[in-house]
Amino acid sequence: MTMTTRPVYLIPLLLLFALLHGCSTFGPARTVDAGTPLNKAVTELPDEQLLDVWVELFDPGELPEDEDKAMGLSMDIREAEARYLPEQLRATMETTGHWGAVRLVPRDTTGSELLVRGTILESDGEQLALQITALDATGRQWFRRTYREEIEYAQYTNRGQNGTDVFQPLYNTIANDLAEFRAKLDAAETAAIRRVAALRFAADLAPEAFAGYLETDRDKYKVVHLPAAEDPMYQRVQAIRDRDFLLIDTLNGHFDNFTRQMESPYTEWRKARSEEAAALRKLEREAWQRKLLGAAAILGAIAVESSNNGNNAGSSVLRDVMVVGGVYAIKAGFDKSSETGIHRDAITELDESFSSEARPMVVEVEGETHELTGSAEAQYTKWRALLKRIYASETGLAGS
Amino acid sequence: MKHGRFLITAGLLLAICGAAADDEKLLERLRIDHAALVAAEQDFHSRRQRGSLNGREATDYAGYVARLHRQVAEDCVALSAAGLPAPSGLGCPSQPPPMLAPAAIDQGGEQTTDEQIASLDAELLSGLGEFDEMLLREQDRVRAAAPMTDAAGGGGAGDAGTAEGLDGAEGEDGEDGAEAEGDSGADASQGEGAGTGAQRQGGRRGVPPDIPDGSDDDVVARQLREAAEKETDPELKKKLWEEYRKYKQGTR
């Protein structure tokens, strides 16, 4: 008889063991053994082989639909991250030696040799997921990939102490992928990208003079022929392009100021949020474990009751102990659950506080960007008209 | 009477000589400013192209180049005001830029094609000058708004760091077929970045006494200082130190 009851006892215990084992992998924390080194150029590339890179301000994306995941997050934070995160990628790429000038530009800025676009898919201090698209001036898409990294709270104290962004491996990986693709290009392809970028800029400013130099087919650009180096119209456009570069460099001064202002509060927010989220998960896990333990004990008591029909005095005691213990464990689980509210409130408060800190910084840098690009655009419009008149005078064709 | 005539003649000769000396000064200034502009532009382009300027340094350097553009434009205007022809190859338009005399009058009907183009070129140059001025003002705003936490200015992002693992990448590739999965299992790493702050070396050999120690130099000032220190031609060395002084005054 006892032989037949043992498997019945074991069922809830095995169930409990399986559930508790499952709990040990609960949560986003992953043990990371190794990192991603940044691939740096071994030899110096000749100037004519270097491509300028423009990293666009990221698309802030959308907040998670899941209420728990979206807890406390706001679009104000995302807007700040959309300006902060691309600067981390830009700075990473700048140190590799694979590229020419690497600059941050507002979204939809035209004229780049290589354009890197990004969308924030997830960002909550513990996870960062970015979708990155790389396009060169000829219209070729190098790739579109999703990069994702999860970190533990402890890494804020390990990695973050020397001023490095905790998600540096993610930026390293993106930079490495771009460098890997770049390495596949031969000299002619690189030269073509540079020429197309210059001529697209020229054609944008003086389409009458330069549109014919390019062939366009479904957003792909090809150089048909080249202007003479001493072509005065091309020299005028080059003088304007030089100013365009200066403008972008100046704009990067504002972005740099923004990043430096954001760095400390943003890192603190991510760190504190990560700590609270880790504490919340721990509590939730403990609450869940206790509830399961209680349920398993009660199930065990039922099994004891059904196997012995309540005739064995020892079994009766065991059954009662299991019922009482089970109920107590379930109650303790519910108590733990109620404690999670403190951490939820803390996360919400942290997010609100950081939102209110980041919002004016974003407004300020956005205002400066608009002011500068707006003035530049007004000036470019004048130059377009002027170049059109010059072209008309030089060629004898009717101008405006 | 003879004495009087002699004095008038001498006076006239002196005035002519003085005017000639002034003209020569104007031309000399234009030459120096233009040479500084060409050298700075070449250096800027080269450094920019090599990616050896970080964001903050590039901003400072861009401001310096814009300031030199403006300086050359002002020299051209001064020459034009003195009634001197603009020498070719020094960045002046063949017609006086309308900064002095706005070209609002429609002279199109009376101008030859070359004159029309020269006039439009002058207008373009003027626009470029205004744009440079706007960039200079913006430079000042950027500098004024810079957080006080980093006196050296920039260069921090992307610097050193131990990098640890990540999940990896997934996605679709462009037409050239790079692999979709990013490599996630990399080795222990250093996401290091070479710090950009150039190290100043040596003492104050050949440095004029009024030149400060350079501890607060930005990238442009540092390059001017280095160029002046290395220069062996005493005349050019003097001019480079003069450029350095002017730049430092401008940034205060």
Image (cartoon, coloured by chain):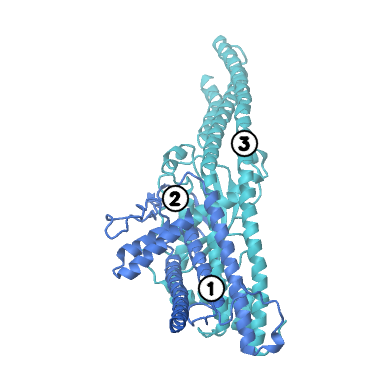
Chain colours: A cyan, B blue
At mark 3, the secondary structure is helix
Residue B238 horizontal/vertical position (percent): 35, 66
* Chain label for disc 1: B
The label nearer to you, 3 versus 1, is: 1
On screen, residue B78 versus residue B194, left or right, reads: right
Disc 2 residue type? Gly
Tell me the residue that label 1 is attached to: B78
At mark 1, the secondary structure is helix
The answer to which of A273 and A122 lies nearer the viewer is A273
* Chain label for disc 2: B
Q: Is residue A33 above or below residue B238?
A: above
Which labelled disc corresponds to residue B156? 2
Which labelled disc corresponds to residue A353? 3
Q: Determine the residue positioned at 54% across, 77% down.
A: B82
Disc 3 residue type? Ser
Gap in Å between the C-alphas at discs 2 and 3?
A: 26 Å
Q: Is residue A120 above or below residue A270?
A: below
Disc 1 residue type? Ala
The answer to whether residue A198 is visible is no
